[in-house]
Image (cartoon, rainbow, N blue to C red):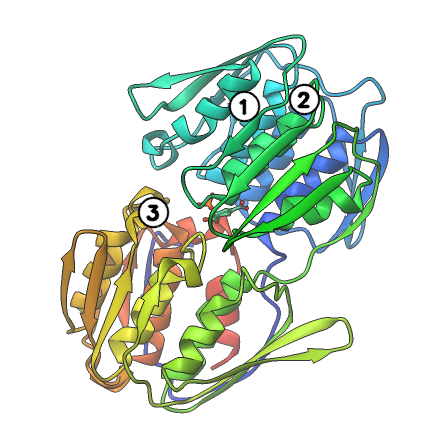
């Protein structure tokens, strides 16, 4: 793929598609399989480069991978994972780096973790602090502990009780993964319910967890145990399905379906936001799976709080929905957006502005005055700054609106290598 992608307006959009396997589930399926003894299988693993980075790292740490027709077989060594003298390359993937910090903290010895230009300016203090309390030394650059990282892990970690100061599933997961082989129980408390992928998958692998509700948040207590081998099934990634939900809703002539989507409440908050805006978007069940339906709609502005879409992955594409709406949408408490693959706070505002919207910010909030319809979007150019979700948000805006050119579009491969092919198949 050339690194600049030109997207044209599509006259009509019809069809069903499957998005890649959920990225969060994929990383954890690889990690838990590597930690277990014996062979696990994974069906539906994400083909994205982020997940490839995790896969390459568990190999370096001693697990083996074999690709069967539609499954991946991972064998964890009986004696457990071991330190690698070569750097562990996390590429563009914050999830890989943060989760692996937890994993390698429990492997005695020294480790180095590196990433690309985007990952190298992202804060790792959020995992370095709790892992430090457990007995591991995570060093990086400056106050934010940015990569490259060096991790010095002791013979044995100690369990801790930790209140996560930011809404972050990655931090929660890093601490729980480290807690698997610590001395004593590990308790994590979060004030906002972030995705519970780690907790559910640890339970499925036989690890004892107690989960309690505390106000709007949760407290998770883990008793150390080795995960058991498991046959993992990875459902479709709801954060990828969100791009097609908005595409269908803002395009003037669209009827779309995304099949087999993960639909836990922490992941599909965007559906409620779109429905509140008047979008004809809904989830239905078909057997064990969820299908996301989306059709052309007329949208009204709304107010969105970060709590509704924990981890804020869907905010760039919801900004595109707000841009096509009538009225002023408010995005509240969006500071975490600044710390993603790019500064998505600024990037989302820039995108809305490029589409012709009036935008402004106040502290951690930003506002978008929509242009009333995607038909009114301006044609635009956008530089992706190594951010896969910004690439896809731009492509949706260009396809529903009046076209765009995206510089650095190949970074979409971090999570969705066939995104542009799938978009073309709907036209
Ligand atoms: C993820 C957690 C989220 C999200 C990321 C995947 C995970 O980050 O942005 O795409 O798999 O745990 P937070 O740590 O900010 O919740």
Instruction: Name the foreground residue: 230 vs 89.
Output: 230
Q: Is residue 199 above or below residue 96?
A: below
Between marks 2 and 1, how big is the CA–CA gap? Answer: 9 Å
Circle 3 or circle 2, nearest the eye: 3
Q: Which residue is mark 2?
A: 61
Q: Is residue 65 at all visible to an observer of this figure?
A: yes
Instruction: Name the foreground residue: 300 vs 221.
Output: 221
Q: Earlier in the sequence, mark 1 or mark 3?
A: 1
Q: Earlier in the sequence, mark 3 or mark 2?
A: 2
Q: Secondary structure at mark 3?
A: helix
Circle 2 crowding by C-alpha within 10 Å: few under 14, some 14–19, many from 20: many
Q: Residue at x 44, y 23 (%)?
A: 129
Q: Is mark 1 within 8 Å of ligand 1?
A: no
Asked whether, in this view, residue 106 is left or right of residue 209, the answer is left
Counting the numbered discs, the total is: 3
Examine the image and state in which quarter residue 342 appears. top left
Q: Is mark 2 within 8 Å of ligand 1?
A: no
Contact, mark 2 vs mark 1 (Cβ under 8 Å): yes
Asked whether, in this view, residue 52 is left or right of residue 390, the answer is right
Q: Residue at x 27, y 82 (%)?
A: 325
Q: Is residue 93 at all visible to an observer of this figure?
A: no
Between marks 1 and 3, how big is the CA–CA gap? Answer: 26 Å
Across and down, in percent, residue 270 comes to 45, 69
Q: Earlier in the sequence, mark 2 or mark 1?
A: 2
Q: Which residue is mark 1?
A: 88
Across and down, in percent, residue 329 comes to 25, 73
Q: Is residue 172 above or below residue 322?
A: above
Asked whether, in this view, residue 1 is left or right of residue 404, the answer is right
Q: Which residue is mark 3?
A: 336
Q: Is mark 3 within 8 Å of ligand 1?
A: yes
């Amino acid at each position: 793929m050339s690194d600049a992608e030109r997207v044209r307006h599509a006259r009509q959009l019809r069809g069903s598609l499957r998005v890649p396997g959920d990225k969060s589930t994929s990383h954890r399926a690889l990690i838990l399989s590597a930690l277990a003894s014996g062979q696990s299988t994974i069906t539906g693993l994400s083909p994205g480069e982020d997940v490839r980075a995790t896969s390459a790292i568990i190999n370096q740490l001693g697990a083996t991978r074999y690709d069967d027709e539609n499954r991946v077989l991972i064998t964890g060594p009986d004696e457990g994972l071991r330190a690698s003298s070569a750097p562990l390359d996390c590429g563009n993937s914050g999830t890989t780096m943060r989760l692996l910090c937890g994993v390698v903290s429990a492997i005695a010895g020294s480790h180095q973790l590196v990433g690309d230009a985007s990952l190298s300016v992202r804060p790792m203090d959020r995992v370095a602090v709790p892992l430090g309390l457990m007995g591991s030394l995570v060093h990086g650059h400056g106050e934010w502990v940015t990569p490259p990282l060096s991790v010095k892990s002791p013979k044995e970690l100690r369990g801790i009780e930790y209140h996560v100061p930011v809404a972050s599933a990655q931090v929660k997961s890093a601490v729980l993964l480290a807690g698997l082989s610590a001395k004593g129980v590990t308790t994590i408390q979060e004030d906002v319910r972030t995705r519970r992928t780690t907790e559910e998958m640890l339970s499925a692998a036989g690890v004892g967890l107690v989960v309690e509700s505390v106000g709007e948040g949760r407290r998770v207590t883990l008793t150390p145990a080795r995960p058991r081998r498991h046959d993992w099934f990875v459902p479709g990634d709801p954060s990828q399905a969100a791009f097609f939900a908005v595409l269908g809703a803002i395009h003037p002539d669209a009827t779309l379906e995304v099949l087999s989507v993960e639909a836990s409440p922490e992941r599909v908050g965007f559906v409620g936001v779109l429905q509140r805006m008047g979008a004809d978007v809904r989830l239905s069940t078909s057997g064990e799976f969820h299908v996301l339906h989306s059709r052309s709609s007329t949208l009204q502005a709304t107010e969105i709080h970060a709590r509704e879409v924990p981890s804020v992955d869907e905010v760039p594409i919801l900004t595109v929905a707000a841009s096509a709406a009538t009225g002023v949408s408010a995005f509240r408490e969006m500071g975490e957006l600044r710390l993603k693959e790019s500064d998505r706070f600024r990037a989302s505002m820039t995108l809305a502005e490029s589409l012709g919207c009036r935008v402004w910010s106040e502290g951690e909030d930003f506002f978008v005055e929509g242009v009333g319809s995607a038909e009114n979007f301006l044609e635009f150019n956008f530089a992706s700054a190594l951010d896969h979700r910004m690439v896809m948000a731009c492509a949706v805006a260009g396809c529903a609106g009046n076209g765009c050119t995206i510089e650095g579009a190949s970074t979409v491969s971090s999570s969705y290598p066939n995104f542009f092919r799938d978009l073309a198949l709907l036209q």
